[in-house]
Image (tube, coloured by chain):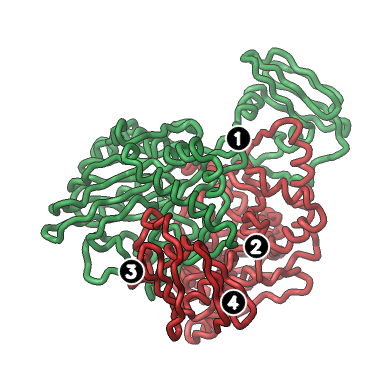
Chain colours: A green, B red
Amino acid sequence: MLNDFEFEQNSLTLNWHDGRVTRLDVLWLQDHDPAGRHANGQRLISVLDLDWQATIQSVERQDDELVIRLSNDRRLHYSLARLHQDGLVSQQDDRGWSGKTLWRGEDFQVPTVDWQAYQSQDDARRRALAAVADSGLVLLRGVPCEPGQVLKVIETFGFVRETNYGRLFDVQTVVSPSNLAFSNLGLGPHTDNPYRDPVPGIQLLHCLANEVDGGENLLVDGFQAAAMLRQEYPEAFELLTQVRLPYRFSDGQADLRSRVPFIETDQAGNVLKVRYNNRSIAPFMLPFDEQRAFYQAYRLWAEVLSDPELALTFRLEPGDCLVFDNTRVMHARTAFTDGGRRHLQGAYSDLDGLYSSLYQSGAQSC
Amino acid sequence: MLNDFEFEQNSLTLNWHDGRVTRLDVLWLQDHDPAGRHANGQRLISVLDLDWQATIQSVERQDDELVIRLSNDRRLHYSLARLHQDGLVSQQDDRGWSGKTLWRGEDFQVPTVDWQAYQSQDDARRRALAAVADSGLVLLRGVPCEPGQVLKVIETFGFVRETNYGRLFDVQTVVSPSNLAFSNLGLGPHTDNPYRDPVPGIQLLHCLANEVDGGENLLVDGFQAAAMLRQEYPEAFELLTQVRLPYRFSDGQADLRSRVPFIETDQAGNVLKVRYNNRSIAPFMLPFDEQRAFYQAYRLWAEVLSDPELALTFRLEPGDCLVFDNTRVMHARTAFTDGGRRHLQGAYSDLDGLYSSLYQSGAQSC
């Protein structure tokens, strides 16, 4: 796989058959020395163990490895496979939008997996987890209509994030709800719990009964919305990545506060997480001359999120369990009558557990 | 409290007795309209409900409120108390370093609270939680030396963050540990689990037995370290807020990955979170011409963190339970002999729960 290589005092350049070039500083070579790692992969050396004076004296190819001799007489043994793989490590964050399917509701089918198949077939399970990673959601069909099943679903890929709402929470109308989610009001597109630090990365909603008129579910791909905002209004997009808005939820039992931007990006401008939740934005103050520009950007974001072309509309039926990325997918519901029963059970989990299960199932980084 | 006010079409300016001036855009006034909130404080209006054409027609003071009439005939009623309070909402993030006690180990006493007092006296409990918020840690003394007590401690302020290590984990030497923490090796200053997304904000370590030679505990205030780095090497500091390093932990049962910078700041440059964990940094790749500058900054960060003046050294004794902010305080331990028993139980929780309990206890934002 290696065509040839060349080196200078402080660098090694590898020219691969596929045309790719990897150029490594002698400090990188010391830091990534395979001999500096425990069998379990944990790095045993610290950056303070690197020799800042050391230069490369020679590089020799021995079969499928390179032996790099340093001026301090240390020898680093790198397999070509490792260098090729290390070189492949991109700066891509698998939590961000790069390489993922961004969708519009009008031409998108909810990825659906049968719960029986999920439990018995590795492939069905992998498909379900990959759908959450790739498009932000999966609908599990046929989850028994019994209370607590939402926790069984979480156990298959991670751990329950317990909150002040409990290990799970019931979404049904109650008198004088402490949270509007527990009323029969419609709710605009939102992500849950921006006032929580850290925010739960995965949300589940399991339908036990749905006999009301109304109460339809809407989903919006926040990554798609962010892409549209960036394309049409790059300045508004930029502003929304900068301003950290305060969120708060306070009900006598809890007083939760956090401060986060609507859109979170990495240094290259890739979107990592999005949020929107008008209900729990706390009173905030910006310098006067920044207020109007902020409200304009905020309005554009709200407008994109309520674009009918983006919304995926469907109705959760008994046995349906929706699993979605709460740092990406916005959910909404229409108002519903008080006439019949509507009972969902919800719960939260975290992204790392779901991605870990996905990688363990044999999937590569997405 | 209000001296006088003036208004223009799009703005209201309030001059307070204390000399403070609050200037509000008419959009802010509409958005923060007290009538637009549910009794529980949740905002019922969306940014899309604001009237972009509306201007201020008149402002009248009536006793302790201002009545603002808009050109669309809507009237906004604001109590002065509310405007004064809203105006006071700072842009400060209580998770960041602003207003907190940054400490050096050599002249810092570990805040210590008796567990009996914590359980029976509101004041002792508030003092303990405030210590974690203010200086990043508290040592609870006299927690019974029985397994599982660490979970009882968490129950007093929040929820257990269950992970692949369990609801709690035992730190004692085992043969072929999957994680070096479970060996008798020394561990340099580090924060836990940077490979977890999201990272646990609170860590607890409860000592059940400590009969070994060595195994001393070191703590370093990462906020203090970041302040020193910024002062002495502003370019290195800046670089470390930009580069998102990949972390990974993989042991056959889990494959956890995340990508975060060493130092996380808000737009004003305030430090929000810090991290350091050489063991679990995954292979990473930067463009060649950025590698050396990054390693130089990384080394300066490691050097500051290992500055002996910063380290607080002590020894956990049976019954001690250390509670600390894992997004701020680095912990370390010296190596220890295999001769006697050393048994700690650890567990994770989240920052929002602890701060919520602190606010519920009557403390103001710190």
Q: Is residue B42 above or below residue A19?
A: below
Q: How many residues crowd mark 4 within 10 Å: few (<14), some (14–19), many (20+)? A: some
The residue that mark 2 highlights is B329
Q: Which residue is mark 1?
A: A91
Q: Can residue B127 be seen in this snapshot? A: yes
Q: Quadrant location of residue B67?
A: bottom left
Circle 3 sits on which residue?
B38
Residue in view at x 62 percent, y 76 percent: B20
Structural crowding at the residue carrying mark 1, measured as other residues with C-alpha within 10 Å and reported as few (<14), some (14–19) or many (≥20): some
Identify which amino acid the numbered label 2 is placed on: Val
Depth check: give the residue in front, B32 or B140: B32
Chain of residue at mark 3: B
Q: Which label sits in the foreground, 1 or 2? A: 1
For the residue marked with disc 4, what is the amino acid? Asn
Residue B269 falls left or right of residue B351: right
| Residue under disc 1 on the same chain as residue under disc 3 | no
Q: Are marks 1 and 2 on the same chain?
A: no
Q: Earlier in the sequence, mark 2 or mark 4?
A: 4
Tell me which label, 3 or 4, sits earlier in the chain: 4
Viewer-nearest residue: B302 or A79: B302
Amino acid type at circle 1 is Gln
Position of residue A262 in the picture relative to residue B270 (left or right): left
Judge if badges 3 and 2 mark residues of a common chain. Answer: yes
Amino acid type at mark 3: His
Name the residue beneath numbered marker 4: B15
Q: Position of residue A254 (x, y in %)?
A: 41, 71
Q: Are marks 3 and 4 in contact (CB under 8 Å)?
A: no
Q: Nearer the viewer, mark 2 or mark 4?
A: 4
Identify the residue at image location x=23%, y=45%. A320
On the rendered image, what quadrant is the N terminus of chain A found in? top right
